[in-house]
Image: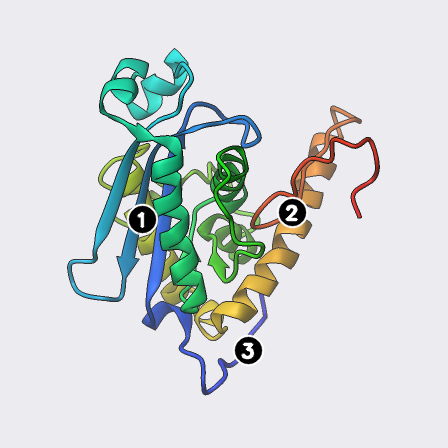
């Protein structure tokens, strides 16, 4: 990557300012139907011991055994110890909205999944969700852009290992949020052309890069499956159109 843009004088380059890191664990892999089971938000740049907030949520449905095996929360635990979805979601979205209104970047690994889950949950529970979520920093998009031909897995644990970033527990919302923040910071140091961008500029670039990356993956998949489709929308997938008409 050769992009190198100097940050505007009145904007703090994102690695050195305040950031909010977010992660969610859910009932499934489809962001259109998944329900939140746990969530975590970490406020970075405030102190050496950043404020952390976590939620255990009662999703109102059975948690599939395969999902419980990953995040270690059972249906019984969620029902007896979890917060009502609307109550927890209102707090999560309020924290997210407050950070965005303050201009703080939101760090989310594979943002289209986590943020789309939040948006759909908000719609189900009549919780107002920001019409535009920006600026977002997605280490998955950044890594793929700066080192696109590297072989190997690109999961959060794999990237933390590659960049020698501390990760204290995969599939734990708090530890994943912290690891994503550390990874974003490390990427800015390893690839200073990223750090030279303002948060808003970086957000715009990631929108472009995500589309290019999706197109590349789709082309690869269509070698064996001519119908394969990869959505390149970022950082939130547009809501499905149920009218039968093409989205505007």
Residue lying at 55% horizontally and 78% vertically, measured from the top left: 5
Residue neighbourhood size for the residue with mark 3, other residues' Cα within 10 Å, grouped as few (<14), some (14–19), many (≥20)? some
Residue 53 in percent (x, y) is at 25, 47
Task: Look at the image and tell me in which quarter the N terminus lies.
Answer: bottom right
**Residue 229 tag number:** none
In terms of depth relative to the viewer, which is nearer, 173 or 209?
Answer: 173
Residue at image location 53% in from the left, 33% down from the top: 124
* In this rendering, position of residue 94 left or right of residue 51: right
Q: Are circles 2 and 1 on residues that touch, CB within 8 Å?
A: no
Can you see residue 34?
yes
- Which residue was labeled with disc 3? 5
- Taking depth in this image into account, of 96 and 127 the one nearest to the observer is 127
Instruction: Please tell me whether residue 27 is drawn above or below residue 189 in the rendered image.
Output: above
Comparing labels 2 and 1, the label whose residue is closer to the camera: 1
Report crowding for label 1: few under 14, some 14 to 19, many 20 or more residues within 10 A (C-alpha). many
Residue 119 image position (x, y, % from top left): 52, 42
- Identify the mark nearer the N-term, 2 or 1: 1
* Left or right of residue 145: residue 71: left
Position above or below: 115 against 76: below
Q: Which residue is mark 2?
A: 233
- Give the camera-side residue of 73 and 176: 73
Name the residue tied to disc 1. 41
Question: Residue farthest to the right?
Answer: 245
Q: Secondary structure at mark 3?
A: loop
Answer few, some or many: residues within 10 Å of disc 2's Cα (few below 14, many 20 plus, some between 14 and 19).
some
**Residue lying furthest front in this view?**
126
Residue 33, x across and y down, in percent: 54, 26
* Spot occupied by residue 202 in the image (x, y as percentages of width and height): 53, 66
């Amino acid at each position: 990557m050769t992009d190198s843009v100097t940050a505007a004088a009145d904007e703090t380059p994102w690695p050195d300012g305040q950031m909010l890191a977010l992660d969610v664990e859910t009932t499934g892999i489809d962001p259109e139907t998944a329900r939140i089971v746990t969530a975590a938000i970490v406020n970075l740049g405030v102190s050496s011991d950043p404020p952390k907030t976590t939620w255990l949520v009662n999703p109102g449905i059975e948690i599939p055994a395969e999902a419980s095996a990953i995040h270690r929360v059972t249906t019984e635990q969620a029902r007896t110890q979890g917060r009502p979805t609307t109550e927890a979601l209102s707090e999560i979205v309020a924290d997210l909205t407050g950070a965005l209104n303050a201009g703080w970047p939101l760090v989310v690994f594979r943002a289209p999944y986590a943020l789309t889950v939040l948006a759909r949950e908000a719609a189900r529970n009549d919780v107002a969700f920001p019409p535009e979520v920006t600026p977002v920093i997605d280490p998955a998009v950044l890594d793929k852009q700066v080192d696109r031909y590297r072989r190997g897995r690109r999961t959060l644990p794999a990237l933390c290992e590659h960049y020698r970033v501390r990760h204290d527990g995969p599939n734990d919302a708090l530890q994943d949020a912290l690891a994503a923040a550390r990874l974003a910071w490390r990427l800015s140091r390893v690839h200073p052309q990223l750090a030279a961008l303002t948060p808003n500029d970086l957000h715009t670039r990631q929108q472009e890069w995500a589309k290019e990356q999706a197109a590349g993956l789709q082309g690869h998949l269509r070698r064996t499956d001519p119908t394969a489709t990869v959505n390149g929308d970022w950082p939130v997938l547009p809501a499905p159109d149920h009218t039968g008409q093409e989205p505007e």
